[in-house]
Image: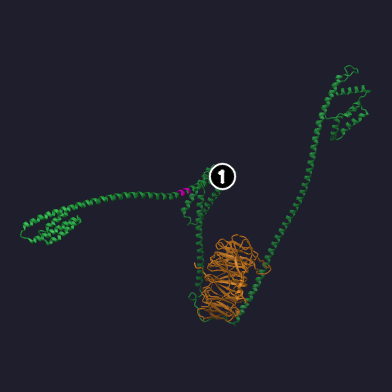
């Protein structure tokens, strides 16, 4: 219920004061209604009594009841009178009506509250919008002013630009004009110069004539004697032959110069061709065998075959000797092809790297930079490890070497000890053997002495026997034989005594000695003692 | 040989002993040795007389009188037996023969800077002639002075000609108002013509490389353009800016060393040697850090023959270096490496460079700046050599001995010989 109904009540004057505000409020703006409404929705308790008292009094009770009844019925409420047409009031209906009115009042109050709230909201929205509107208006003003300023500047700059263009044109025109002036002046000067020169020539000719004519000071050359030519040749007459020869010589000089230059250029050419070929080979070697696309592979294959063909052809033709156009073109074209391929390849690699950077792992055999770096790190680690290993091994080797020295020394010592012991043992054995030998020797010598003694005895016996024999046989020969036999005997005895002293060594000597004396003796006797001695010697 | 007034003094080159003394008729203006070093000609321009002396026979004499024709220039022919006299006003060139006492005339020679050029082997001579306001070049055979070729050149005003060292190409260049370099072959055909730009002042100096491979053209725009002998096209332009910023260039700057004086050893009155050493400042070379800005002079614009542009060009004997001087930067010598076509070294001196000469055997450059110091540069380094002496010796020109062991330093009135020691290897 947003509408306020104009309650036109035949009111008393006291009511009019209150009711007038009602009617007049409608004309006011909605904002002012709020405050009024609030005031009126909760009638102050002071006014209540006066308000209620003012309407119905003791006198106009009937009138007021009938008026209320009329109002209620027009409002749609049941009549407050009883059924019958008497003046009895139906209390129940009155209460109902009052209740209904209260409910209505509540409803109205709530609606009023809602409306007030909405009103407030709308009011604040409106304020906000108004503020925004004001701000935007300000901004618009500012920007308009800026635009105007910029436009002004733009106009100024454009005008400056136009001025500068104009100046430039003027300058150019001036320059052109000045050049024209210069050229015209130059031609004028040239003309003047030529004129002056002609005059000068004329003067020179005149002077020359005068000089030649005067002949007061003779042109002369005094030379003491002729000087020989530098190259010793005689002067030649000026003839056609000489002229021809001159020409010839001149052409020879020129030709030789050209030939030299041509040789140099040929050499340069050959070198450059070699360099180009080398470059071609290098480029071919640089291009890797591409595995990515079959199309490319086929292309590469074709190109490779082309290259090989090219190389083959060129090698066959010995191109550095030829210098014809086609060969040169071929070479340059092939190099250009290779270079283009190399460029493409490098570009591809660059793209791959870029893609790798951005993170697209499309190609399988693309090694991204991070992977590459990882691998390089790994390799470096490996290298370091290997180096460390090598170091340690070296150290160990060194240690080993030093250890070997000690051990060898020890070993050597051990060996020495062993050897020494062995040697000592051997010495012992040796000494033992020596002792044994000595013993045997002694025994031998003793045996030899005994043998000698026995022999002596034997010899004495033998001598005695022989003596008997002699005496018996040669009773005649007395003294001589005795002496000789005595001599013999003495010899024998000497020998025998000698035998005793030296067993082995002197036996031979005895034998030798024996031989000498027997020369004195008769041959018959001598052989016998010799025989005896020999026999002894043999024993 | 040196001349003083009207006397000719001949000295030995290694000991400077006076060997001969000759007296001429008049003040000698010009002397020249013959190519076989047997004769010396002395030219006296005022009198118009040339006297020739012999070293072998001091009694032998020869006098050539040009008479009223006058004498402007005189020179030997390459065979050492003919003398070419240029008469006054360049009326004609007279060829006097010492062998046959005969005379030949070359008419209409041109009065230009380098109007006569002999080939290195002495076979041919080229002369610039001008008839009817047109330039011609005549090529003569030096043996018998026969005219070989005569052709005209498309130049406004031919300024100079120069043979290439191989004797097959002749370079001719136009006046400085017009940049034009023409190249003719020995038989007179035009091989090529080169023009760098049209209006500004043109060629100032030209030099052939010893191998005839390059022709360096120095022009008034402070640049040197090098042409190659195969195509006769420009291979590079060498610029001479006032600021050097390339890191690969070595800049040697001459700085003055303040002389150290031992105050205890000062005597009164001061001895001459001490005085000279006090007042003559020593100087040495110092390497300046790049970038270096050189002293740039902009001359007055309304004078003729301004001191701008590359005025001096010289190739080293081994064809590896080119020394140039930009007249705008008169204190610096620019040495370019020809193999790399880059600026190798800049020598910055204290005074204006008067001249420089390359050693005929090694890549060694001697520079003189008008003071009593000689500056030597070689790829190994550079050194300042003070000419010892009391008087102020202002060196104006240098001339190397053909063996490269000594050089002649000339000033206005004196000369001295500088001997260079060879390192024992």
Image quarter (top left, top right, bottom left or bottom right) of the N terminus of chain A? top right
**Chain A display color:** green
Could you tell me if residue A75 is visible in this image? yes
Residue A321: give x, y in percent of width and height.
47, 57
Could you tell me if residue A326 is visible in this image? no
Q: Is residue A475 left or right of residue B288?
A: left
Residue A254: give x, y in percent of width and height.
52, 66
Does residue A42 sit above or below B137 in this rendering? Answer: above
User: Which color scheme does this rendered protein use?
Assistant: by chain
* Image quarter of residue B338: bottom right
Magenta-colored stretch includes residue A392: yes
* Chain letter for the part of the structure drawn in orange: B
Residue B336: give x, y in percent of width and height.
58, 63
Between B233 and A15, the residue placed more toward the observer is A15
Q: Which residue is mark 1?
A: A370
Magenta extent: A391-396
**Dominant SS in magenta:** helix
């Amino acid at each position: 219920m947003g509408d306020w109904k104009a309650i036109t009540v035949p009111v008393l004057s006291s009511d009019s004061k209150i009711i007038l505000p009602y009617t007049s409020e409608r004309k006011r703006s909605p904002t002012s209604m709020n405050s009024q409404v609030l005031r009126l929705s909760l009638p102050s308790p002071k006014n209540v009594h006066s308000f209620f008292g003012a309407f119905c009094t003791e006198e106009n009770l009937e009138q007021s009841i009938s008026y209320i009844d009329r109002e209620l019925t027009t409002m749609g409420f049941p009549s407050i009178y009883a059924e019958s047409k008497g003046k009895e009031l139906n209390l129940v209906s009155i209460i109902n009506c009052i209740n209904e009115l209260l409910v209505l009042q509540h409803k109205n109050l709530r609606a009023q509250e809602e409306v007030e709230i909405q009103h407030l909201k709308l009011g604040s929205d409106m304020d906000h919008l108004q503020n925004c509107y004001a701000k935007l208006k300000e901004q618009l003003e500012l920007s308009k002013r800026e635009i105007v300023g910029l436009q002004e500047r733009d106009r100024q700059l454009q005008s400056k630009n136009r001025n500068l263009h104009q100046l430039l044109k003027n300058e150019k025109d001036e320059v052109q004009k000045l050049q024209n002036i210069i050229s015209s002046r130059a031609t004028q000067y040239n003309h003047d110069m030529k004129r002056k020169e002609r005059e000068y020539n004329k003067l020179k000719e005149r002077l020359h004539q005068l000089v030649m004519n005067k002949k007061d000071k003779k042109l002369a050359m005094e030379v003491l004697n002729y000087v020989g030519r530098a190259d010793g040749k005689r002067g030649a007459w000026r003839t056609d032959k000489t002229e021809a020869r001159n020409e010839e010589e001149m052409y020879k000089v020129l030709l030789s110069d050209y030939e030299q230059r041509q040789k140099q250029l040929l050499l340069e050419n050959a070198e450059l061709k070699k360099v180009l070929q080398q470059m071609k080979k290098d480029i071919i070697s640089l291009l890797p065998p591409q595995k990515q696309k079959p199309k490319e592979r086929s292309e590469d294959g074709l190109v490779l075959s082309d290259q090989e063909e090219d190389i083959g052809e060129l090698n066959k033709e010995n191109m550095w000797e030829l210098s014809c156009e086609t060969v040169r073109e071929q070479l340059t074209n092939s190099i250009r092809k290779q270079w283009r391929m190399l460029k493409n390849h490098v570009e591809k690699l660059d793209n791959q790297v870029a893609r790798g950077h951005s993170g697209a792992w499309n190609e399988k055999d693309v090694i991204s930079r991070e992977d590459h770096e990882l691998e390089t790190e790994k390799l470096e680690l490996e290298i370091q490890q290997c180096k460390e290993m090598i170091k340690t091994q070296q150290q160990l080797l060194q240690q080993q070497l030093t250890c070997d020295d000690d051990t060898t020394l020890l070993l050597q010592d051990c060996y020495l000890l062993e050897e020494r012991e062995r040697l000592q043992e051997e010495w012992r054995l040796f000494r033992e053997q020596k002792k044994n030998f000595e013993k045997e020797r002694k025994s031998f010598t003793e045996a030899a002495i005994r043998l000698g003694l026995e022999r002596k005895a034997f010899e004495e016996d033998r001598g005695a026997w022989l003596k008997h024999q002699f005496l018996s046989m040669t009773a005649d020969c007395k003294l001589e034989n005795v002496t000789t036999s005595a001599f013999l005997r003495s010899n024998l005895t000497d020998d025998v005594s000698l035998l005793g002293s030296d067993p082995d060594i002197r036996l031979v000597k005895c034998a030798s000695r024996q031989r000498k004396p027997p020369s004195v003796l008769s041959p018959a006797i001598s052989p016998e003692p010799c025989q005896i001695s020999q026999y002894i010697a043999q024993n | 040989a040196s001349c003083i007034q009207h006397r000719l003094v001949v000295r030995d080159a290694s000991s400077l002993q006076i060997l001969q003394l000759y007296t001429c008729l008049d003040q000698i203006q010009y002397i020249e040795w013959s190519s076989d070093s047997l004769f010396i000609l002395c030219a006296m321009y005022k009198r118009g007389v040339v006297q020739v002396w012999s070293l072998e026979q001091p009694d032998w004499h020869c006098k050539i009188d040009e008479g009223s024709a006058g004498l402007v220039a005189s020179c030997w022919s390459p065979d050492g037996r003919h003398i070419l006299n240029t008469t006054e006003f360049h009326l004609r060139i007279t060829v006097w023969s010492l062998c046959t006492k005969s005379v030949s005339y070359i008419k209409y020679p041109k009065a230009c800077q380098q109007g006569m050029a002999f080939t290195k082997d002495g076979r041919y001579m080229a002369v610039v002639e001008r008839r009817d306001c047109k330039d011609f070049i005549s090529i003569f055979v030096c043996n018998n002075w026969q005219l070989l070729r005569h052709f005209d050149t498309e130049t406004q005003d031919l300024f100079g000609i120069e043979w290439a060292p191989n004797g097959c190409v002749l370079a001719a260049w136009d006046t400085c108002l017009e940049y034009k370099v023409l190249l003719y072959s020995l038989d007179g055909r035009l091989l090529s013509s080169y023009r760098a730009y049209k209006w500004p002042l043109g060629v100032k100096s030209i030099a052939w490389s010893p191998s005839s491979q390059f022709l360096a053209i120095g022009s008034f725009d402070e640049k040197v353009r090098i042409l190659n002998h195969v195509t006769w096209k420009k291979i590079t332009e060498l610029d001479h800016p006032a600021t050097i910023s390339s890191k690969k260039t070595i800049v040697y700057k001459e700085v003055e060393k303040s002389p150290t004086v031992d105050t205890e050893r000062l005597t009164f009155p001061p001895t001459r040697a001490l005085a000279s050493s006090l007042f003559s400042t020593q100087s040495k070379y110092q390497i300046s850090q790049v970038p270096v800005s050189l002293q740039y002079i902009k001359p007055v614009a309304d004078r003729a023959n301004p001191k701008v542009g590359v005025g001096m060009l010289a190739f080293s004997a081994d064809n590896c270096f080119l020394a140039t001087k930009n007249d705008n930067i008169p204190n610096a010598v620019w040495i370019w490496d020809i193999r790399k076509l880059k600026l190798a070294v800049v020598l910055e001196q204290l005074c204006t460079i008067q001249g420089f000469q390359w050693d005929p055997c090694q890549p060694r450059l001697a520079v003189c700046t008008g003071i009593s110091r000689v500056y030597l540069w070689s790829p190994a380094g550079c050194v300042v050599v003070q000419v010892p002496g009391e008087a102020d010796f202002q060196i104006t020109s240098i001339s190397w001995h053909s063996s490269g062991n000594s050089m002649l330093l000339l000033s206005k009135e004196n000369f001295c010989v500088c001997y260079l020691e060879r390192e024992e290897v």
